[in-house]
């Protein structure tokens, strides 16, 4: 068994947290080769080589891969697929765009959000908003998987794998990059933060959402939001936590004004410690919370901020 792991690269730097966690899962299958793509990604390739368990790093330093477009990336992966039984990536927005195309080109299925590796052919993944775990056995010659990183510990640093430069694959030229619009923030990245403070519909307005942000800044935390808060315009889309948003598993998750709909719980229930603040003592969030405070958030949160 040989595994090709697509490394997550942002602005030429390796996203160590997501890549290292996907590596932990990939090592359960077999020897792992990491693929780094994009001009200027030399530092990312060097970092990937230091992850414990990496046998080799392949670096395709072509400009066509800089913006992680699905079509050229898929073409590159397929050109390398002959040497591997498994193609793996962390379940990020980039990989969810690329790997289904890879699977289609290889005429195999894609297994998304894998949360457990039983053996090289058998995998576990959550279904029904995380309320059940499905065990899937694939008979495909090539297995294509995205890994739900929140369920795996990151691989350690300490390896010294060789880095091999490889040529670009033929670009199918089916799409072209126009521009990226990205939100910049001094706060930690939501999916890898150790502390997350999230607000829900109970916050009431976009103006009042600053309370959530103030508490997050006091704690050095990332800011999250429920889908209800995002749909109401209180918070931007990239803050959404839940089944149709981001999956997080921080050491501390603070849910404020969030009722705890099943779709939201699917995105945060693996958090180590869950704290809930809600004035409705029958809110479902209290069923999963380690600590619950039944209180008006407009009284409790300012007091909490002042105490901190």
Image (spheres, rainbow, N blue to C red):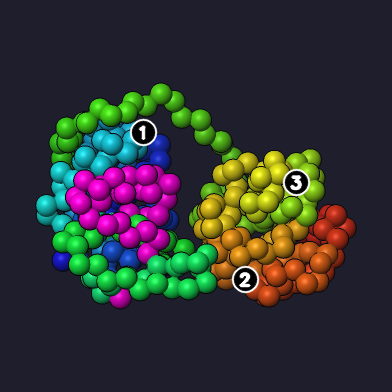
In the picture, the quarter occupied by the N terminus is bottom left
Badge 1 density bin: few <14, some 14–19, many ≥20, Cα 10 Å:
many
Task: Return the residue at label 1.
Answer: 67
Decide: is 213 above or below 138: above
Going from N to C along the chain, the mark reached first, 3 or 2, is: 3
Is residue 109 visible in this depiction of the protein?
yes
Circle on res. 209: 3
Residue farthest along the top direction in this orientation: 178
The mark found on residue 113 in the picture is none
Q: Identify the disc placed on residue 273.
A: 2
Q: Which badge, 2 or 1, is on the more N-terminal residue?
A: 1
Closer to the camera: disc 2 or disc 1?
Answer: 1
Secondary structure state at the residue bearing disc 3: helix
Under circle 2, the secondary element is strand
Asked whether residue 92 is drawn in magenta, I would say yes
Q: Which residues are magenta?
A: 89-118
């Amino acid at each position: 068994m040989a595994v090709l792991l697509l490394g997550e690269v942002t602005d030429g730097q390796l996203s160590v947290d997501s890549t290292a966690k996907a590596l932990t899962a990939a090592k359960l299958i077999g020897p792992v080769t990491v693929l780094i793509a994009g001009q200027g990604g030399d530092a990312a390739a060097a970092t990937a080589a230091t992850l414990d368990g990496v046998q080799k790093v392949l670096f395709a330093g072509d400009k066509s891969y800089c913006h992680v477009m699905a079509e050229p990336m898929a073409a590159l992966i397929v050109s390398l697929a002959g040497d591997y039984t498994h193609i793996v990536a962390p379940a990020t927005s980039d990989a969810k765009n690329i790997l289904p195309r890879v699977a289609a080109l290889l005429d195999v299925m894609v297994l998304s959000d894998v949360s457990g590796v039983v053996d090289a052919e058998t995998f576990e993944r959550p279904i029904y908003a995380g309320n059940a775990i499905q065990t899937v056995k694939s008979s495909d010659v090539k297995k294509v998987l995205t890994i739900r990183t929140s369920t795996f510990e990151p691989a350690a640093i300490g390896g010294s794998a060789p880095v091999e430069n490889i040529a670009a694959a033929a670009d199918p030229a089916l799409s072209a990059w126009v521009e990226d619009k990205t939100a910049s923030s001094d706060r930690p990245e939501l999916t890898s933060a150790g502390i997350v403070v999230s607000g829900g519909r109970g916050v009431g307005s976009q103006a009042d959402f600053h309370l959530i942000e103030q508490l997050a800044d006091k704690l050095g935390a990332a800011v999250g939001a429920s889908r209800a808060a995002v749909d109401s315009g209180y918070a931007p889309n990239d803050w959404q936590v839940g089944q149709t948003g981001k999956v997080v598993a921080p050491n501390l998750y603070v849910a404020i004004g969030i009722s705890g709909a099943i779709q939201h719980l699917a995105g945060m229930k693996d958090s180590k410690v869950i704290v809930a603040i809600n004035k409705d003592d029958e809110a479902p969030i209290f069923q999963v919370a380690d600590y619950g405070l039944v209180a008006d958030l407009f009284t409790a949160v300012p007091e909490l901020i002042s105490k901190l």
